[in-house]
């Protein structure tokens, strides 16, 4: 159940990424880290569609976390890139090349190998207040550091730094969600006596805001690489240290787990450097490629289905 729900969440997130990228592509560069970026986005119907799907994705992810471990659900979400390729190939009619197939093979192989070697289990321990304090201070400090780093430098660096901040914020939100699903089993009235629901609201808004800045700051290749690679790795650490996720031990097992995660990360990097996933082809900008893709998709639609 957790695998299936996490995969559905990954598919929903892939659709969300496409819609929201189109939604912020025309925002002026001066709107970075300003509410004007969000005000620009919400005026566009396609971005609002993406936001609605983001809420659906959250529901799927939360349900997956209720049934599964943090170190299982978050790595499965990396398959978002595979679904993004599927959308580009089927809907936007882009042809998948050797790079895309290789990246997909590495992601699937690395993910499957990690689960076979690690066999994550447990993960139902609720963290203590002191554990939350330590984790919160570390993660919030890291997010702040990446935001400061994103304020200057070339566009690719700013996009990568915003992507890293988004990844940490999203992993923190997933950990908070996991805790809330544990409190729900004790009754909804018990949930709101803890700080997690309120902190989740803050981290959720922060994730949305940082994601829009990551998409707007520079090449989607840079932001997507740091976002997709850092999120599952941080989540695995949080799952082990906070929730008691147990991975198989021993020198051989740990070596295989690390190797599998390395293969997964390489696959993600290969895919994010693909012109299709990056949103740039033959030197065109993200907006130009997505605009061309939209025209191609419109041409592929039946006349009666066109807006």
Image (cartoon, rainbow, N blue to C red):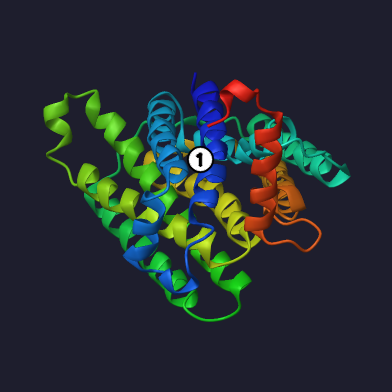
Residue topped by disc 1: 16
Question: What residue is shown at x 58% (from left), y 50% (from top)?
Answer: 228
Q: Can residue 247 be seen in this view?
A: no
Image-based side of 152 in relation to 109, left or right: left
When the figure is inspected, residue 62 is found, relative to residue 185, above or below; the finding is below
When the figure is inspected, residue 63 is found, relative to residue 172, above or below; the finding is above
When the figure is inspected, residue 147 is found, relative to residue 270, above or below; the finding is below
Q: Residue 209 or 235: which is nearer the viewer?
A: 209
Image-based side of 191 in relation to 105, left or right: left
Q: Where is residue 50 in the image (x, y as percent from the top left)?
A: 46, 40
Q: Residue 198 or 89: which is nearer the viewer?
A: 89
Q: Is residue 199 visible?
A: yes
Q: Position of residue 12 (x, y in %)?
A: 52, 32
Q: Quadrant of residue 60?
A: top left
Question: What residue is shown at x 36% (from left), y 46% (from top)?
Answer: 173
Q: Residue 242 or 36: which is nearer the viewer?
A: 36
Q: Where is residue 224 in the image (x, y as percent from the top left)?
A: 60, 54
Q: Where is residue 58 in the image (x, y as percent from the top left)?
A: 39, 35
Q: Residue 281 or 3: which is nearer the viewer?
A: 281
Please tell me how many numbered marks the rendered image carries. Answer: 1
Q: Quadrant of residue 293?
A: top right
Secondary structure type for disc 1 = helix
Dot 1, how many residues are within 10 Å of its Cα: few (below 14), some (14-19), or many (20+)? many
Question: What residue is shown at x 60% (from left), y 41% (from top)?
Answer: 78
Q: Which residue lies furthest to the top in this view?
A: 1
Q: Which residue lies furthest to the front in this view?
A: 303
Question: What residue is shown at x 27% (from left), y 35% (from top)?
Answer: 180
Q: Which residue lies furthest to the right in this view?
A: 98
């Amino acid at each position: 159940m957790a695998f299936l729900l996490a995969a559905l969440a990954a598919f929903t997130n892939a659709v969300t990424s496409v819609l929201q990228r189109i939604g912020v592509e025309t925002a002026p560069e001066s709107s970075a880290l300003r509410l004007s970026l969000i005000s620009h986005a919400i005026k566009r119907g396609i971005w609002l569609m993406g936001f609605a799907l983001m809420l659906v994705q959250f529901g799927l992810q939360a349900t997956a976390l209720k049934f599964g471990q943090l170190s299982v659900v978050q790595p499965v979400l990396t398959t978002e890139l595979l679904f993004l390729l599927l959308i580009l190939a089927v809907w936007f009619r882009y042809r998948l090349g050797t790079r895309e197939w290789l990246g997909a093979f590495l992601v699937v192989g690395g993910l499957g190998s990690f689960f076979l070697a690690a066999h994550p289990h447990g993960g139902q321990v609720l963290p203590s207040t002191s554990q939350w304090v330590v984790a919160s201070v570390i993660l919030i400090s890291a997010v702040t550091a990446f935001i400061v780093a994103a304020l200057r430098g070339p566009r690719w660096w700013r996009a990568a730094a915003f992507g890293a901040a988004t990844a940490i914020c999203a992993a923190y939100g997933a950990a908070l969600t996991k805790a809330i699903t544990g409190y729900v089993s004790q009754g909804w009235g018990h949930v709101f006596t803890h700080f997690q629901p309120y902190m989740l609201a803050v981290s959720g808004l922060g994730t949305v805001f940082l994601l829009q800045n990551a998409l707007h700051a520079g090449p989607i290749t840079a932001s997507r690489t740091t976002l997709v690679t850092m999120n599952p790795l941080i989540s695995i650490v949080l799952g082990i240290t906070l929730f008691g996720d147990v991975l198989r031990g021993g020198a051989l097992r740990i070596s295989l787990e690390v190797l599998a995660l390395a293969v997964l990360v390489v696959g993600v990097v290969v895919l994010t450097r693909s012109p299709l996933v990056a949103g740039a082809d033959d030197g065109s900008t993200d907006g130009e490629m997505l605009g061309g893709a939209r025209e191609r998709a419109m041409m592929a639609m039946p006349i009666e289905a066109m807006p």
